[in-house]
Amino acid sequence: MYLDISKLQGLTELSLVGVDILLDLGAAACATFERLTGIKFGKQTHTEVYDGKGDRTLFVKNTPVVNITSVTITYSDSETEVLLGNNFRINSTTGKITFKPDSRGYFPTGEQNISIIYVAGSEPVEPEVELATQRLVLEFYRALTTTSGNILRERLGEYSVTYGTVQGQVPNDVMSVIKMFARRIVLP
């Protein structure tokens, strides 16, 4: 989780909420934000497995890439080779990993035969992301504490119920930040 709990406790509406609940709400908000953007925020180590396509380049899922720890290649004869990160060039913004020009390396064709361990993410997290996630925590808390089910009006004759906006949904201001950071996949 990339949120600072003390900052959540500083929000008036959450100041009396227990730490355990704030941790749960914070984790849920961070997971929601990361799921909707397709980006893992905060520096984290990632292990990913890919199909080799017989070329010198592949793209990892999480950016910005800080460094590559290792790449394990399994060849068709089941022989494995472990290469350190200094054998590769990294485009940290796009997640493009390429063998260095002086290397004769390539990613051999195969299913799930390339395993990459790398570090990606940024610290501190961008202020817009942190504020939007705090707002999401607040919205999740309100959804937990709303007892009316967000009913604005009820009528008994010819029974009718009118609902307001659904508590717990991602607010528009948070969605605008999510859209700003959402990963866009562009195929060549």
Image: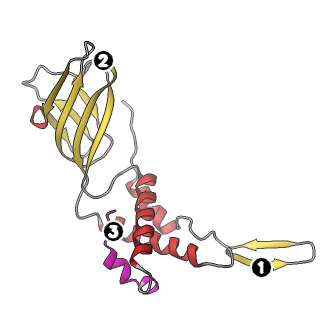
**In the displayed structure, would residue 156 be above or below residue 71?**
below
Circle 2: residue type: Thr
Marks 3 and 1 in Cβ contact (< 8 Å): no
Q: Residue at x 52, y 66 (%)?
A: 172
Residue lying furthest left = 102
Q: Which residue is mark 2?
A: 109
Q: Which mark is residue 153?
A: 1
Coordinates of residue 59 in the picture (x, y in percent): 29, 35
Extreme right residue here? 157
Vertical placement of residue 127 versus 41, above or below = below
The amino acid on which the numbered mark 1 sits, given as a three-letter code, is Arg
Q: Residue at x 43, y 68 (%)?
A: 24
Provide the residue designation for mark 3: 3
Residue 103, given in percent of the width and then of the height, sits at 9, 23
Relative to 71, 2 lies left or right: right
Label 3: element kind:
loop
In the rendered structure, does residue 128 fall within the stretch colored magenta? no
Mark earlier in primary sequence (2, 1): 2
